[in-house]
């Protein structure tokens, strides 16, 4: 069993350790490891395998290319080249799958090789395989998930330690839990890419990540956390998608979840994915969404599947793109915050247009209410009308999901 590994960072090292630890059971030979700067690895036990020239990799014979460099380019070109050379590929690269999954799966099929990507969603949690194999007999109606460990860590710390978003982000960056440029995590892009991969597989139609409603956590402040606590809730960055009448709707956004819900018990770097199948009902998968060992474990299992000839290609990426509705239309509750002295006028408005509501707080600074309506469109309309009337320039909305 011969493999070539592109990338010797967090996940690459996790994979190499697993190969080492399991060498009595599985004799996997690493032919080469590609990095950007090989000088960093002069002291490494694997220095003799490490190269910064992709031609050194392709010049050796190997059965599987494991892509762990991340990003779109040159990862895409390397994977394409391997597939066209009829070499199976394992990747953890959700950015690339979300963008080019259709092209790569097509190339893999044309060349009768396999492209596997268990680690691209949920890090160490086996979720792609259960979804595509164990749940195959089900129609998946909907799913909801916490898919980004960085934002879950930030929100957990804000909730537990009363620290501001900026303070926790800084700490997360120092601890290596957040990137120097955290945009993809905190603005929800990473979670949306993962949700699009899962939705594509579950609904067997190509769902594009930018088509979801997308909102990150960078505007969550301590008052949001305070009101969440007051209502017995936590705030989580949740991805949810639904298949309805051949249409998909979905979002990634911060939402309120009840303290006794499944989602609220998943803190810090942990992830959760919950599928709703017509036969099986609700099934959930919880575990470490990132990290060297956990993610290495998913990559390792893909490698073993290929060596054991469990070679499937998942067609869903090649299906036609489906229209995605950005708003989940069903009955919903939302916490609304109005920074305005015109609380009476706002309440009068709310009274007229909203099915029912509770006042959570009303002080000199702001009015906070929980509204119950039959569609999120209604809330958006009310907020626009209140703004147009000049009652409040600045309002905030946090959906509550159950
Ligand atoms: N980290 C996680 O917990 C996690 C979880 C799930 C999925 N993933 C995915 O796994 C992949 C790898 O992530 P990671 O955290 O292991 O990244 P990382 O720690 O930044 O490591 C990246 C590795 O790739 C090498 N590299 C980057 N660009 C390269 C290029 N153009 N040419 C050659 N080598 C290059 C780097 O070389 P140098 O060492 O010379 O810099 C480094 O060894 C990404 O797609 C990521 O989204 C990561």
Image (cartoon, rainbow, N blue to C red):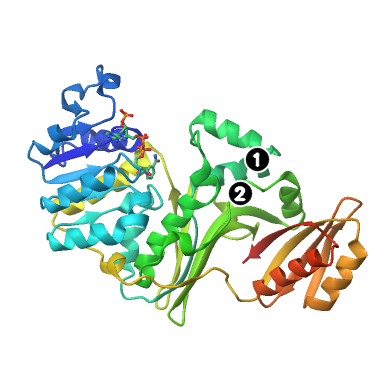
385 left or right, relative to 254:
right
* Residue 166, x across and y down, in percent: 65, 36
| Residue 312 in sight | no
Point out the quarter of the image occupied by ligand 1. top left
Q: Is label 2 within 8 A of ligand 1 (CB to nearest ligand atom)?
A: no
Q: Residue at x 62, y 36 (%)?
A: 168
Please name whichever residue, 143 or 215, is drawn nearer the observer in this view of the structure: 215
Q: Quadrant of the C terminus?
A: bottom right
* Residue 77, x across and y down, in percent: 23, 46
Q: Which mark is residue 217?
A: 2
Cα distance between the residues tagged 1 and 2: 9 Å
Q: Residue at x 34, y 49 (%)?
A: 119
| Residue 365 in sight | yes
- Structural crowding at the residue carrying mark 1, measured as other residues with C-alpha within 10 Å and reported as few (<14), some (14–19) or many (≥20): many
Q: Residue at x 58, y 31 (%)?
A: 171
Say which quarter of the image contains residue 203: bottom left
Q: Earlier in the sequence, mark 1 or mark 2?
A: 1
* Residue 393, x across and y down, in percent: 80, 57
Q: Secondary structure at mark 1?
A: helix
Q: Quadrant of the N terminus?
A: top left
Say which quarter of the image contains residue 207: bottom left
**Tag 1 residue:** 165
Q: Which mark is residue 86?
A: none
Cβ–Cβ under 8 Å for marks 1 and 2: yes
Please name whichever residue, 207 or 298, is drawn nearer the observer in this view of the structure: 207
């Amino acid at each position: 069993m011969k493999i070539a590994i592109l990338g010797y960072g967090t996940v690459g090292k996790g994979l190499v350790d697993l190969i080492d630890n399991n060498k009595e059971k599985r004799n996997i030979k690493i032919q080469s490891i590609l990095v950007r700067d090989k000088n960093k690895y002069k002291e490494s036990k694997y220095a003799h395998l490490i190269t910064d020239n992709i031609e050194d990799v392709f010049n050796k014979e190997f059965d599987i290319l494991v892509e762990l460099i991340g990003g779109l380019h040159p990862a895409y070109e390397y994977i394409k080249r391997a597939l066209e050379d009829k070499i199976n590929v394992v990747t953890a690269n959700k950015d690339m799958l979300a963008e080019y999954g259709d092209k790569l799966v097509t190339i893999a099929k044309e060349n009768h090789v396999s492209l596997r990507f268990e680690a691209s969603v949920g890090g160490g949690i086996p979720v792609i395989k259960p979804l595509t194999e164990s749940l195959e007999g089900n129609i998946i109606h909907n799913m909801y998930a916490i898919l980004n460990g960085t934002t879950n860590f930030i929100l957990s710390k804000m909730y537990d330690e009363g620290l501001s978003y900026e303070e926790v982000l800084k700490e997360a960056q120092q601890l290596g839990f957040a990137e120097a440029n955290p945009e993809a995590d905190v603005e929800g892009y990473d979670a949306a890419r993962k949700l699009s991969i899962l939705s594509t597989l579950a609904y067997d139609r190509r769902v594009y990540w930018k088509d979801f409603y997308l909102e990150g956590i960078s505007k969550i402040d301590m008052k949001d956390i305070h009101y969440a606590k007051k209502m017995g809730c936590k705030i989580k960055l949740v991805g949810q998608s639904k298949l309805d009448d051949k249409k998909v709707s979905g979002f990634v956004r911060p939402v309120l979840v009840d303290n006794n819900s499944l989602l609220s018990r998943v803190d810090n770097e942990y992830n959760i994915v919950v599928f709703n199948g017509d036969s099986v009902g609700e099934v959930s998968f919880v575990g470490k969404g990132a990290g060297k060992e956990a993610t290495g474990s998913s990559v390792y299992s893909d490698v073993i599947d290929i060596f054991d000839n469990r070679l499937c290609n998942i067609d869903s990426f090649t299906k036609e793109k489906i229209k995605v509705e950005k708003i989940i239309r069903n009955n919903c509750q939302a916490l609304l915050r109005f920074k305005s002295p015109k609380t009476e006028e706002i309440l009068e408005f709310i009274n007229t247009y909203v099915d029912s509501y509770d006042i959570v707080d009303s002080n000199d600074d702001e009015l906070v209410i929980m509204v119950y309506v039959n569609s999120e469109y209604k809330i958006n309309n009310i907020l626009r009308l209140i703004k147009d009337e000049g009652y409040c320039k600045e309002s905030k909305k946090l959906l509550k999901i159950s």
